[in-house]
Amino acid sequence: MTMLSGKVALVTGASRGVGAAIAKTLSRAGAAVAVNYFQSAEKAVSVVKDITDSGGSAVALKADVTHAAETQKMIDDIVSTFGRLDIIVNNALPKYAFNPTESYVSIESVEWSDFERQFRGAVGAVVNTTKAALPTMKAQGFGKIINISTNLVYNPVVTYYDYTTAKAGLLGLTRTLAAELGKYGIRVNLIAGGLLSLTDASAATTKEVFDFIASSTPLRKVTTVEDFAQSVLMFAADFSNALTGQSISVDGGLTMP
């Protein structure tokens, strides 16, 4: 028996990159996985095929998690298909390019509409998935909600004003949800990632930037999507049941909040 046997997990934004790695990691640990996507249907189906070919159970479900009605339908479909929902990994990310050498952002150039877009994608999506799943998790007396943030919240070395501010809001939401939902057996935690190798968002990042990050970390390496997915598994598994309202950086020790 593996550590997540009998559990059902939803990973939002799971058609590629770190989301796909998380979905596959949770599956290998025994969970049935709902692979959420918004536009990349073909890639989501490919992730599901990888999981099922390896003996796991998975479905691809389309939903824009910034829309409450679409999110509710997706959650209803998961519960109808698998009978429960134990784990939510809020990974979906509005399109963003992480390349500080070419895309410097100034407070003079960033628009409030940029902030609004990131807040809808970071905070709004978590509100939608949580509210949709809450009746099921309360009835079960158990749930794990894992929110994905950024280490820029602790060390804003690049001026991604809209992205970093929205992710900082997600930290406040995580702690407030943990305080309210703990009495129902629902744990809510946050993982703050650094620059990951390799995702669509970091594809434009130069080798020089990756090398600098690696040389700045105690582990002397850039965190991979697989490394990051293992940290998600830690929060999803029962051996972290005493943890809620926590925020950790998964960046090789680059930041130590």
Image (cartoon, rainbow, N blue to C red):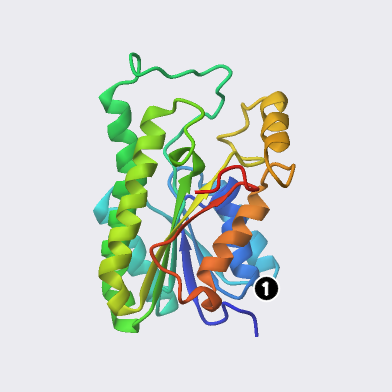
Residue wearing tag 1: 55
Residue at position x 35%, y 49% from top?
A: 170
Q: Residues within 10 Å of mark 1 (few under 14, many from 20)?
A: few
Q: Is residue 156 visible?
A: yes
Which residue is more in the foreground, 230 or 107? Answer: 107
Residue at position x 51%, y 19% from top?
A: 103
In the depicted structure, whether residue 206 falls above or below residue 82? above
Residue at position x 66%, y 27% from top?
A: 209
Q: Is residue 30 left or right of residue 136?
A: right
Residue at position x 49%, y 36% from top?
A: 155
Q: Secondary structure at mark 1?
A: loop
In the depicted structure, whether residue 26 falls above or below residue 121? below
Which residue is more in the foreground, 171 or 97? Answer: 171
Q: Residue 184, image x and y in percent?
A: 29, 78
Q: Residue 18, image x and y in percent?
A: 58, 49
Residue 160, quarter of picture: top left
Q: Residue 159, image x and y in percent?
A: 45, 25
